[in-house]
Amino acid sequence: MIINTTLLDVDELDFDFAPRAWDFESKFAGEIDAHWQGLLARNPAQFNGRVLLLDKHQIVAESGEKRVLRGTFLETDYKSFSAWRDFGWPDPSIRNCFAMAALISDDGAFLLGEMSTGTSLPGRIQFPAGTPDLADVMGLKVDLEASAFRELHEETTLSSNDVVPAAGWTLVLDGPRIACMKPMRAKGTAEEIVAKVTRGLAQQRDPELVRLHIVRDHKDLDEARIPAFMLSYLRSAFSLEPEMRRGT
């Protein structure tokens, strides 16, 4: 499998919330509505909430070797976002920029969630993540670290007390996607964390995840269900020594 992605480490994310009209929404309004009806026919559980997309962005070098991803987010609805994605990303000026909680256990295993049938991506295996939304807007800023922790808790029931976040971020640049990986060391062995999350999911009425998958090396990669940008991230991580993977 050929994966055209770029991985880049940055020290900080700095995003402003700067809503504006998105031309794609008005230009393709009829097509967007028709596409949404088709999605609902296949999965009535989908919800047309408000989401945020990255409008303008750049990576800047500050004092010393510090690198910061700066940008602005606009607001749209999920049906417009899903149409933009499924139509082949027709507005190349916009990016789908989101945070992922890159979970790794004390014994060096990555922990990926399998999405349930009630989600928009049933069966996909990936780190806890979600398209940022208005809950991630703090004043005039968009806080993707808060988004990563929120999605971690919503999907796995793990809280900030259960993990130790690493400093900085690893960006996976994949065409119109920017996956902002926040490494988080979960306290315990892989098996202990899976057991804890399994108990938590059993208490949820409509869990977003079916289960956690333990990924220790290349042979554990389900290439059919793990998205390409995540395969790039994991393969890069596998090249590190185990103690470096566990470190934060």
Image: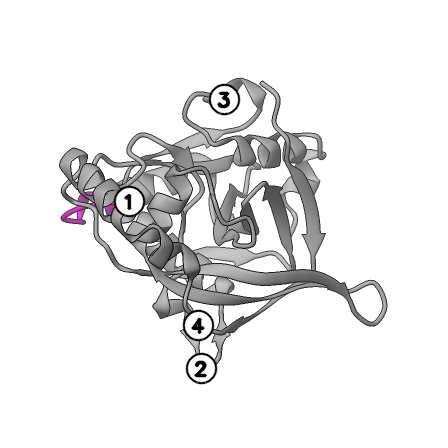
Front in this rendered view, residue 210 or 73: 73
Between the C-alphas of marks 2 and 3, the distance is 42 Å
Q: Is residue 16 above or below residue 61?
A: below
Q: Is residue 63 left or right of residue 9?
A: right
Please state which amino acid type lies under the numbered disc 3.
Asp
Q: Earlier in the sequence, mark 2 or mark 1?
A: 1
Q: Is residue 48 magenta?
A: no
Residue depicted at 36% across the width and 32% down the height? 124
Res 146 → quadrant: bottom left
Quadrant, the N terminus: top right
Q: Is residue 67 left or right of residue 97?
A: right
Residue depth check, mark 3 versus mark 1: number of the one nearer the observer: 1
Q: Is residue 201 magenta?
A: yes
Q: Residues within 10 Å of mark 1 (few under 14, many from 20)?
A: few
Please name the residue that numbered disc 4 is placed on.
Answer: 19
Q: Earlier in the sequence, mark 4 or mark 2?
A: 4
Q: Are marks 4 and 3 in contact (CB under 8 Å)?
A: no
Q: Residues within 10 Å of mark 3 (few under 14, many from 20)?
A: few
Q: Residue 247: x and y, percent?
A: 65, 48
Q: Are marks 3 and 1 in contact (CB under 8 Å)?
A: no
Start-end of magenta stretch: 200-207
Please state which amino acid type lies under the numbered disc 4.
Pro
Q: Is residue 110 left or right of residue 198?
A: right
Please name the residue that numbered disc 2 is placed on.
Answer: 139
Q: Earlier in the sequence, mark 2 or mark 3?
A: 2
Q: Are marks 4 and 2 in contact (CB under 8 Å)?
A: no
